[in-house]
Amino acid sequence: MRPEPLGLPRAALQGPEPQAVARMFLYFALILTSYVFASYVLRLPLGRLPRAGLLVLVFLSSGRLLIMRSVFGGLGGIEANRWLLLATSFLQGLIVMLFLLSLARDLAWVLSFLAGKGLGRAARVWLGGPAAAIVVLALAAGLDLAGLIGAARVPGVRRAEVVVNDWPRGLDGLKVAVLADMHISRFFDRGWVEEVVARTMAEKPDLILVPGDLVDGTAEARGPDVAPLASLGAPYGVWACVGNHEYISRLNEWLPVFDRLGIAVLYNAHRVIMPRGIPVILAGLADLSALSPRYGLEGPDLGLALAGAPADLPVILMEHRPVRARENALDPRVALQVSGHTHGGMMPILASFVKKSNGGFLSGFYDVGGMKLFVQPGLGLWSGFPVRLFVPSEITVLTIRTGETAALGQDVARG
């Protein structure tokens, strides 16, 4: 199911954050601070001392990632108290929302020049006044709170049907639970995991797939939080592939833990499973992170994963990122690819960038050259920026249907 050993360079994994990452966090904080201070704080009717205090607060909130990682550390996640994570996440999100809404207000102020002297002048006066500042702050706080609640909640169940080409008739109606991007951490802790497991098991799936980013943090730190995963079970197994966060979290240490939990990891490998006595190939790929000089490992390789596999059986493929779906679809054996990684884009505006960086795939069902692709919006999030705004998390239960022609997935119900 996985090579022995993977040979991850422990020294690199145990070292401090790469300087490039730290600089990225710092630049992020400086950009947010500069714009929010210039566009929002300076317009408030305040004295120098209150403004200076707000400048410090804005910088601390914008620099949450850099500060929290420096103080609390953690591989892949932040090893701080969950309530502290929630509070600081709210402050960070508030600055992000203020940045976006202030940008929108400034754009509206510029466009008001085109509206003529009467209406345009009135709009400019209002947009530059205290009423607009209050509206911007209220909207920012409301959107931020909604996004944080959306991120922290236990995901509901979405049931969907997907018609797969050349799927065996004897396997029509096979139920597959998909649990991508759980990001088990101090933010998504043991209680959250217990609820996820309970909701998944209540669906009585035939097969459970975990396409990457299961954990954030070391096996030692996350031991109690992942323990409820041992209660996951399905007649044809619980299977996983690795995501980019498994590498950050010391993959070598996690593989034996996954084994003990009953989660079989497919790392550029396949297995033939026999649901209802009918053979199907289940395959999983490495993540593109493996190619980083930091790890120096073999990247995702479908040919290697399917080496020795029967040529006439349909393949269900797990790959954490959907970006390589068109390449995978060139192999006619791959009937269905299941991915995650995108988190559905997390929120408007950001979603367009996420979609572009993932080959045009964001969330839901796609027909890719005869292969079905399902990109799950995921269950959890990285605790560095936990926000879900109009992009709900979900436990997905796919019912695979037999069909001779391509068709997109169709929602059945949401629980």
Image (spheres, rainbow, N blue to C red):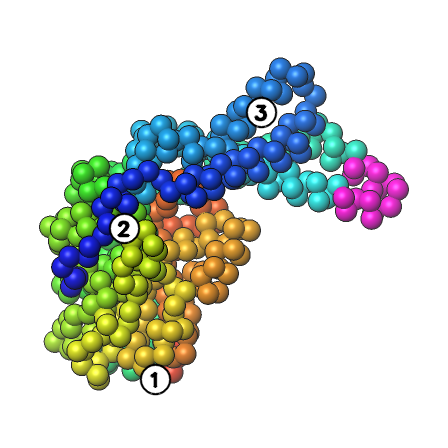
Tell me, yes or no, whether the highlighted magenta stretch contains residue 328.
no
First along the sequence among labels 2 and 1:
2
Q: Quadrant of residue 64?
A: top left
Residue 121 figure quarter = top right
Which kind of residue does numbered mark 3 sit on? Leu
First-in-chain label (2 vs 3): 3
Label 2–label 1 contact, CB within 8 A: no
Q: Residue at x 50, y 61 (%)?
A: 356
Residue 63 seen in the current view: yes
Q: Residues within 10 Å of mark 3 (few under 14, many from 20)?
A: some
Measured in 3D between alpha carbons, the distance from the residue under mark 1 to the one under mark 3, in whole angstroms, is 62 Å
- Residue at image point 12% right, 76% down: 277
The residue lying at 30 percent from left, 36 percent from top is 74
Residue occupying the point 35% across, 73% down: 328
Please tell me the numbered disc located at residue 404. Answer: 1
Q: Does the magenta stretch mainly form a helix, a strand or a loop?
A: helix
